[in-house]
Image (cartoon, rainbow, N blue to C red):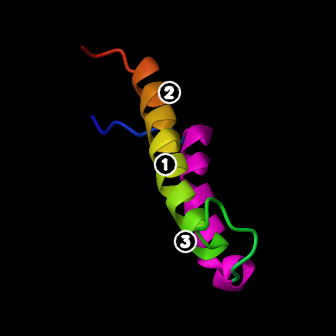
Amino acid sequence: MVQRKQFRAAYLLLLLPFAALLWVPFYDRIDPTLFGIPFFYWYQLAWIVLGAVLILTVYLLHRGGDTTP
């Protein structure tokens, strides 16, 4: 039997980092700076951390619904 994978709404969270970094003119600026680091750089670095948190969240939500060990 073919098992269909159920679409999970939590997977839409994975689109957030993609969408946030896709439009470069939004964050292509210097101000505001954070500890002397221009916005262009710290915005991208912040999304690396946020992306990892989102991936962890989706993983835990997906694994929570898994019935196999």
Q: Residue 38 location, x and y as percent?
A: 62, 73
Three-letter amino acid code of the residue under disc 2: Leu
Q: Secondary structure at mark 2?
A: helix
Residue 28 visible in the current orientation? yes
Q: Secondary structure at mark 1?
A: helix
Three-letter amino acid code of the residue under disc 1: Val
Q: Residue 41 shows which numbered tag? A: 3
Q: Is residue 55 left or right of residue 46?
A: left
Residue 65 visible in the current orientation? no
Residue depicted at x 50% and y 61%: 45
Three-letter amino acid code of the residue under disc 3: Tyr
Q: Residue 61 shows which numbered tag? A: 2
Q: Residue 6 location, x and y as percent?
A: 49, 37
User: Which is nearer the eye, 42 or 63?
Assistant: 42
45 vs 9: above or below: below
User: Of helix, strand and loop, which mostly describes the magenta segment?
Assistant: helix
50 vs 48: above or below: above
* Residue bounds of the magenta highlight: 8-28
Q: Nearer the viewer, mark 2 or mark 3?
A: 3
**Distance from label 2 to label 1 (Cα)?**
18 Å
Q: Nearer the viewer, mark 1 or mark 3?
A: 3
Q: Is residue 69 left or right of residue 27?
A: left
Q: Mark 1 highlights which residue?
A: 49
Residue depicted at x 24% and y 14%: 69
Residue depicted at x 65% and y 66%: 20
Q: Quick one: label 2 or label 3, which is nearer the N terminus?
A: 3
Residue 1, quarter of the rendered image: top left
Q: Is residue 14 magenta?
A: yes
**Distance from label 1 to label 3 (Cα)?**
13 Å
